Image (tube, rainbow, N blue to C red):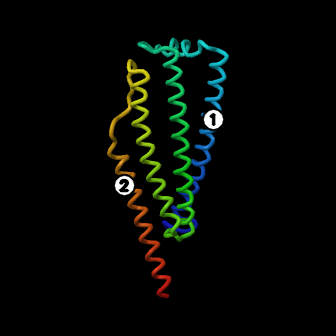
Amino acid sequence: MRALGPGSVSSFLKTVLDVVYFAIIAMLALVTLGVIAGLLAISFVPDLFREVADRLNIEGDVTPGRLAALGVTFAVYGMLYLSALIVILSRLRKVFTTLTAGDPFQPENIPRLRLIGFVLAGMELARYALGALLLAIAPALTWDIDGFNITVWFSVLVVFVLAEVFREGARLRREAELTI
């Protein structure tokens, strides 16, 4: 099976990326609607957070204000996370479009890959911030958020190296075009 061009693995992966991209957009829309519905529900049912805490059997110093802060924190984090995935997937779709066309070393792919690397790094930093924020809001609750993840940072570095590989490929392609 071929790696590049129509009918290749690249074209199959491009199709998968398209489906996932639109599914993530739908998820972001649903989360946004859920946040709006939650904010409306809170304004009409002020004791909602206390009822949620009672149903979830949350113990410790979890006041309705803290529960509201937790809900907003998770909602904002979820919306930012899904938005970051949309950015990554939209750039990957464009990269895979060039792969499917059989011409991967387009100069436009270099900033696309760099942006993917920066967004991945930002997502990991946001995860660290989420952990710190959760501890500050509700220290009595146990949060299972891992610390430093070497795999994620290695992946970020790999994406930046791939961007440089694409840059070098585009440079060699330009040189080859000039010599012909």
The residue shown at (44%, 74%) is 171
Number of other residues with Cα within 10 Å of mark 1, as a class: few under 14, some 14 to 19, many 20 or more? few
Image x and y of residue 106, in percent: 52, 69
Q: Amino acid at mark 1?
A: Leu
Mark 2 Cα-neighbour bin, 10 Å: few <14, some 14–19, many ≥20: some
In depth, the one of 18 and 45 nearer the eye is 45
Label 1: which residue?
Answer: 30
Instruction: Return the mark for residue 90.
Output: none
Kindly identify the amino acid type of the residue bearing the numbered disc 2: Leu
- Occupied quadrant, residue 26: top right
Name the residue: 59% across, 15% down.
Answer: 48
Q: Quadrant of residue 160?
A: bottom left
Total count of labels:
2
Relative placement, left or right, of 17 versus 139 is right
Q: Residue at x 53, y 71 (%)?
A: 103
Q: Earlier in the sequence, mark 2 or mark 1?
A: 1
- List the residue tagged with mark 2: 157
- Residue 16 seen in render: no
The image shows residue 28 at horizontal and vertical percentages of 60, 39
The one nearer the camera, 110 or 151, is 110
Secondary element at image label 2: helix
Q: Is residue 132 visible?
A: yes
> For this view, does 33 lie left or right of residue 65?
right
x and y, in percent, of residue 32 in the image: 62, 34
Residue 68 versus residue 99 in the image, above or below: above
